[in-house]
Amino acid sequence: MSMVSLIVGHKGTGKTKMMIELANDRAEKSSGHIVFVNKNQRLMYDLIHEIRIVCMEDYEEITNSDEYIGFLYGIISSDHDIDAIFIDSILKHADVSTEDIPEFLARLKVISQQHDIDFIVSLSADLEELSDDVTDFNVMKPEGC
């Protein structure tokens, strides 16, 4: 069963490091493809070469969560072997705000179930800042939190 997992914590708590470790580990063990969506190219050398890196700076025209969901559908439709999509620091992409997160995550959950893809999403926030709607998701915190 596919799922949506959240890595939650404030800036500097090790969320990105945790995402990189999880993505690299997943890529080494998975027979499917792994996609890592990041704001820029700075993590390119931290991720193993089997991981497809998508740099959101290359897609500045994506300006809201609806367009972002459509973009994810485009990624999925171009590769039917995707096992997991990692989205680092979603609040830095496409003007997605904490108010958008519950609906965004609910939509990811539907996509996850429809296409048998795990989503791992990092959020720079405290769990208390997010609505109760995130309790349905697997929440992880970096060791420093």
Image (spheres, rainbow, N blue to C red):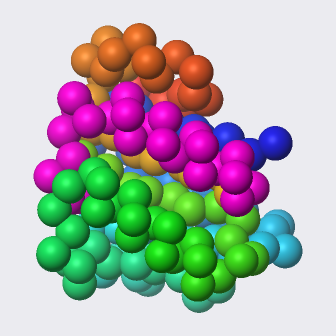
In this rendered view, identify the residue nearer to me: 17 or 123.
123
Instruction: Indicate yes or no whether the magenta region holds residue 144.
Output: no
- Towards the viewer: 15 or 75: 75
Residue 37: give x, y in percent of width and height: 41, 68
Residue 115, position in %: x, y?
A: 70, 59
Kindly indicate the quadrant of the structure image that contains residue 39. bottom left
Image quarter in which the N terminus is found: top right
Q: Is residue 105 magenta?
A: yes
Q: Residue at x 46, y 22 (%)?
A: 134
* Residue 67 image-quadrant placement: bottom left
* Residue 25 placement, left or right of 59: right
In this view, 103 is above or below 61: above
Q: Which residues are magenta?
A: 92-116
Residue occupying the point 38% across, 34% down:
103
Horizontal relation, residue 111 to residue 141: left or right: right
**Residue 53 appearing in the image:** yes
Image-quadrant location for residue 57: bottom left
Residue 74 x %, y %: 48, 76
Q: Residue at x 34, y 16 (%)?
A: 131
Report the quarter where the C terminus lies.
Answer: top left
Asked if residue 51 shows in the view, the reply is: no
* Residue 73 in the image: above or below residue 57: above
The residue nearer to you, when weighing 106 against 131, is: 106
Does residue 86 sit above or below 8 in this rendering? below
Residue occupying image coordinates x 15% and y 52%: 95
The picture places residue 87, in percent across and down from the top left corner, at 43, 57
User: Majority secondary structure of the magenta segment?
Assistant: helix
Tell whether 123 sits left or right of 40. right
